[in-house]
Image: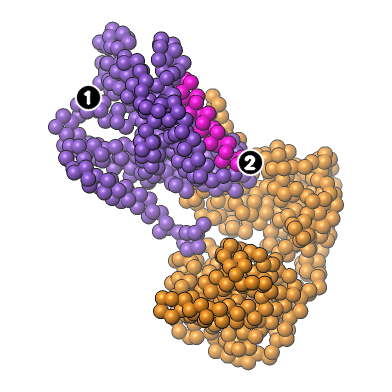
Chain colours: A purple, B orange
């Protein structure tokens, strides 16, 4: 599973190594490093942006950019703040509706791109503004009242999850102990990533995504479902973005139509995608890489806390690190033999 | 020929037009099961259009296509594949960033629980590759890491995976090594024994000879004749392929005076395209590059103009060694390249005629960093008159001009630099006869003024009419140089097919 991407995608391998080094050093420097509390804090601060980065990955694979992912996350968070309330069954139905709404929004993006023949970047710039507008209508001021138990259970360790819902002897069952200290947010992230993305990649539609990004005319000549795959790409992006929105709503127990936050999430998602070894030209990479890319971005900001870096110079350092990391990807062009191909 | 054979495909009076150009006109063509059918013809004879219609890439403008007796109209290659018509395309249909196995089973992978079964896919791909004697290609390798010849083998494997009834090979062997070509031969014999029909297009006459049961000759979009192998001699086939009148007028050629070489190329090598090109072009000469498409002409011109990286060999300008490091450096050294595709490489279509003309010339019309508009106007006026560009206002976008006039703008912008050596990459493609004549006259004027011209054209008649000498390229090297009375269409065609050493034609 991991071996093949490692061999074929040096960008992903480099990102994974970079992340592991940064992460381990961070915990060595941290006064309470390698403790469950810090792991949980790390995971909680990573989940929403990781989902948005996975969302961004898929349009990027077909050679486009989705500028609406941050806004869709915000919109679905606001929606969830109304829907995820009441009895457990009602809450679960509310979660389902939230994810459905996000996916529908993504499919709509795909339809506009495919049938409107509009560049993804400009189509999603417009629909992103629409999503933001809807979010502001839903939540002119931050608010909502998501169940406190749900919030507690999903933002802590497996033990806390079991204790909250009275499962496995309130979390004391012997079989649970090996997993008891794993942060629940990390599990959610991995379950969605490997439960949705990994199987999708192994369908003809999933393979078509890569084919389109790599050589669209060859994909057509080979008789692949190019339109369907593009619509699916944006639909799946909407799904992942709404996973991020749903988690954000539960984490903050509320919905907040924060324009600045939506924009920052969109831009950071692009950075995470590139850091994770996905080519902006399409055809190379994957959502798992973007998880690692998100990890790198987040760990860098964690360092600022423990090293008490002046907040004023944090953006400067983030920018330099990002530039250095993506420059590694540009080494590829040294192999091109026909200089005219640089422009193709 | 006694075995009972069924008609697999038949074309009835099929024509295809592109705008005003006729690519195929009134073609009747039949292909039978259990046969290998060769198609011969010059560049632009309609071979590619024919197979594109058969394989569902193009629809005929008129006429009928019958598959096993049923009339069909395909709107995609997938529909043709469903009927068992599979084409190995000349321009490859492989996805560079996917693995060999993914590509072979790209649209019909083996599945398990609804998901692609990678293990089964890898195993089946390995079996297919073994059948093609290419076991050294690992199914997990990415296509972009393979050489051109390995990619071609994968392309053939991809076609085989679809269990074709009719397999079309368009120049499928041109990128292959000798060993692979033998494999393909054996494969086609096997397929024939299984009742599969193959259509085989190749520029290599001896391959067609060795492989095919039946041959069809195309010329200018028409089906000229179909006959069994052995009914016609090589010379007769060459005559069937040419047989057209020369349609353009050419300026008279002056008697050639011996002159020092202006451009000399020795043992030029690049990737798989140039395999040791030797060329000597004299000052005041129009030197043609002939041969079939894809034998390295374009790469040769690009290499001399510094657009390729990793070129080996020696280039001399006026007896001085020269390293073409970049197009800019070549421009400074007095070279100019009129590119092949004026729409993408020659012009900025939505900029004005004036801006296009001035593009490489700003330095000449500027004082310091400022463009002197009076001098610029003068230069533009000069260019327009010199090439007789028919344009209302030079401020109009260049895309408003006709194809011929657009090409004149491309040429004019380089002429303003007064280059010493002009490289022309198929400059007359798709332009009208009148403009062609003007371009030929300009070339001759330049040559008479002592400039050197290297001229690649896919049209042999132009090479014969225009050039003092013609070098014929085959498989990345010059195989023959013809001049004077020896410069005939027969001679060029024979050399292009690399027949000359066997004394044919």
Residue placed under numbered mark 2 in the picture: A223
Q: Is residue B222 left or right of A44 when viewed as pictured?
A: right
Q: Chain of mark 2?
A: A
Q: Give the structural element (helix, strand or loop) at label 1.
A: helix
What residue range appears in magenta? Answer: A96-116
Query: Can residue A321 be seen?
Result: no
Residue placed under numbered mark 1 in the picture: A36
Give the prevailing secondary structure in the magenta stretch. Answer: helix
Q: Is residue B382 above or below residue B350?
A: below
- Give B312 or B128, whichever is nearer the viewer: B312
Q: Is residue A47 above or below residue B204?
A: above
Q: Is residue B160 above or below residue B291?
A: above
Query: Can residue A93 be seen?
Result: yes
Neighbours of disc 2 within 10 Å: few (<14), some (14-19), many (20+): some
**What is the quadrant of the N terminus of chain A in the image?**
top left
> What's the residue at 53%, 74% (across, down)?
B358
Which one is earlier in the sequence, the residue at label 2 or at label 1?
1
- Give B4 or A310, whichever is nearer the viewer: A310
> What's the residue at 84%, 60% (across, down)?
B225
Neighbours of disc 1 within 10 Å: few (<14), some (14-19), many (20+): some
In x, y percent, where is residue B239? Answer: 80, 69
- Give B221 or B370, whichever is nearer the viewer: B370
In x, y percent, where is residue A292? Answer: 34, 37
The magenta stretch spans residue A98: yes
Which quarter of the picture shows residue B411? bottom right
The magenta stretch spans residue B78: no
Q: CA distance from mark 2 to mark 1?
A: 51 Å
In x, y percent, where is residue B372? Answer: 48, 79
- Give A276 or B264, whichever is nearer the viewer: A276
Q: Is residue A45 left or right of B186 when viewed as pictured?
A: left
């Amino acid at each position: 599973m991991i071996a093949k991407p490692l061999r074929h995608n040096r960008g992903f391998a480099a990102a994974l190594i970079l992340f592991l080094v940064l992460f381990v050093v961070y915990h060595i420097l941290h006064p309470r490093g390698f403790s469950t509390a810090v792991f949980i804090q790390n995971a909680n601060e990573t989940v929403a942006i990781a989902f948005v980065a996975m969302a961004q990955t898929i349009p990027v694979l077909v050679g486009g950019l989705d500028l609406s992912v941050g806004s869709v996350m915000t919109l679905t968070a606001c929606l969830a703040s109304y829907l995820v309330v009441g009895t457990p069954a009602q809450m679960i139905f509310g979660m389902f509706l939230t994810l459905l709404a996000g996916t529908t929004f993504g499919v709509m993006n795909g339809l506009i791109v495919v049938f409107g023949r509009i560049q993804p970047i400009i189509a999603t710039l417009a629909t992103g503004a629409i999503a933001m507008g809807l979010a502001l209508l839903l939540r002119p001021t931050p608010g909502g009242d998501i169940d406190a138990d749900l919030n507690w259970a999903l933002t802590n360790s497996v033990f806390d999850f079991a204790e909250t819902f009275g499962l496995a002897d309130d979390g004391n069952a012997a079989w649970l102990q090996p997993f008891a200290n794993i942060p629940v947010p990390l599990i959610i992230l991995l379950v969605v990533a490997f439960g949705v993305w990994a199987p999708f990649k192994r369908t003809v539609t999933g393979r078509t995504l890569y084919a389109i990004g790599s050589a669209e005319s060859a994909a057509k000549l080979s008789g692949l479902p190019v339109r369907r795959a593009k619509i699916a790409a944006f639909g799946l992006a909407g799904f992942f973005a709404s996973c991020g929105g749903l988690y954000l709503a539960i984490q903050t127990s509320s919905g907040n139509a924060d324009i600045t936050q939506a924009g920052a999430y969109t831009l950071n998602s692009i950075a995470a995608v590139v850091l994770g070894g996905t080519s902006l030209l399409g055809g190379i990479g994957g959502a798992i890489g973007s998880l690692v890319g998100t990890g790198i971005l987040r760990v860098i900001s964690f360092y600022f806390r423990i090293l008490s870096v002046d907040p004023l110079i944090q953006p400067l350092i983030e920018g330099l690190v990002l530039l250095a990391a993506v420059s590694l990807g540009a080494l590829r062009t040294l192999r091109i033999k026909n200089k005219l191909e640089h422009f193709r | 020929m006694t075995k009972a054979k069924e008609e697999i495909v038949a074309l009835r009076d099929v024509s295809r037009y592109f705008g005003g150009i006729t690519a195929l006109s009134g073609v009747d063509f039949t292909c039978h099961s259990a046969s290998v059918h060769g198609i011969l013809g010059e560049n632009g004879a309609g071979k590619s259009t024919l197979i594109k219609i058969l394989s569902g890439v193009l629809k005929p403008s008129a006429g009928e296509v019958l598959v096993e007796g049923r009339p069909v109209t395909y709107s995609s290659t997938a529909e043709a594949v469903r009927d068992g018509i599979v084409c190995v395309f000349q321009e490859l249909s492989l996805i560079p960033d996917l693995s060999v196995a993914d590509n072979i089973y790209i649209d019909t992978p083996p599945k398990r629980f609804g998901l692609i079964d990678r293990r089964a896919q890898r195993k089946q791909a390995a079996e297919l590759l073994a059948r093609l004697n290419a076991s050294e290609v690992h199914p997990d390798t990415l296509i972009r890491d393979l050489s051109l010849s390995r990619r071609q083998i994968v392309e053939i494997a991809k076609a085989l995976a679809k269990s074709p009834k009719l397999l079309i090979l368009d120049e499928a062997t041109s990128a292959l090594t000798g060993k692979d070509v033998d494999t393909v031969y054996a494969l086609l014999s096997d397929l024939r024994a299984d009742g599969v029909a193959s259509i085989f297009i190749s520029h290599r006459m001896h391959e067609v000879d060795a492989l095919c049961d039946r041959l069809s000759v195309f010329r200018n979009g028409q089906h000229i004749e179909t006959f069994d192998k052995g009914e016609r001699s090589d010379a007769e086939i060459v005559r069937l392929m040419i047989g057209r009148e020369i349609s353009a007028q050419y300026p008279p050629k002056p008697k050639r005076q011996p002159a020092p070489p202006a451009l000399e190329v020795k043992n030029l090598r690049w990737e798989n395209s140039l395999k040791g090109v030797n060329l000597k072009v004299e000052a005041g000469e129009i030197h043609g590059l002939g041969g079939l498409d894809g034998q390295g002409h374009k790469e040769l011109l690009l290499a001399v103009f510094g657009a390729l990286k990793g070129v080996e060999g020696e280039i001399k300008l006026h007896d001085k060694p020269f390293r073409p490091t970049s197009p800019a450096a070549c421009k400074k050294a007095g070279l100019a390249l009129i590119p092949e595709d004026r729409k993408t490489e020659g012009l900025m279509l939505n900029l004005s005629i004036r801006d296009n003309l001035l593009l490489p010339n700003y330095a000449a019309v500027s004082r310091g960093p400022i463009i002197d508009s009076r001098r610029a106007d003068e230069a533009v006026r000069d260019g327009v008159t010199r090439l007789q560009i028919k344009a209302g206002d030079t401020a109009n976008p260049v895309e408003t001009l006709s194809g011929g006039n657009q090409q004149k703008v491309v040429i004019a912008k380089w002429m303003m630099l007064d280059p010493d050596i002009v490289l022309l990459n198929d400059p007359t493609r798709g332009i009208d006869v009148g403009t062609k004549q003007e371009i030929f006259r300009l070339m001759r004027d330049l040559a008479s003024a002592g400039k050197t011209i290297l001229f690649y054209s896919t049209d042999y008649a132009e090479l014969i009419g225009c050039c003092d000498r013609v070098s014929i390229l085959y498989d990345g090297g010059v195989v023959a140089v013809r001049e004077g009375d020896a410069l005939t269409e027969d001679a060029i065609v024979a050399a292009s097919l690399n027949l000359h050493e066997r004394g044919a034609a």
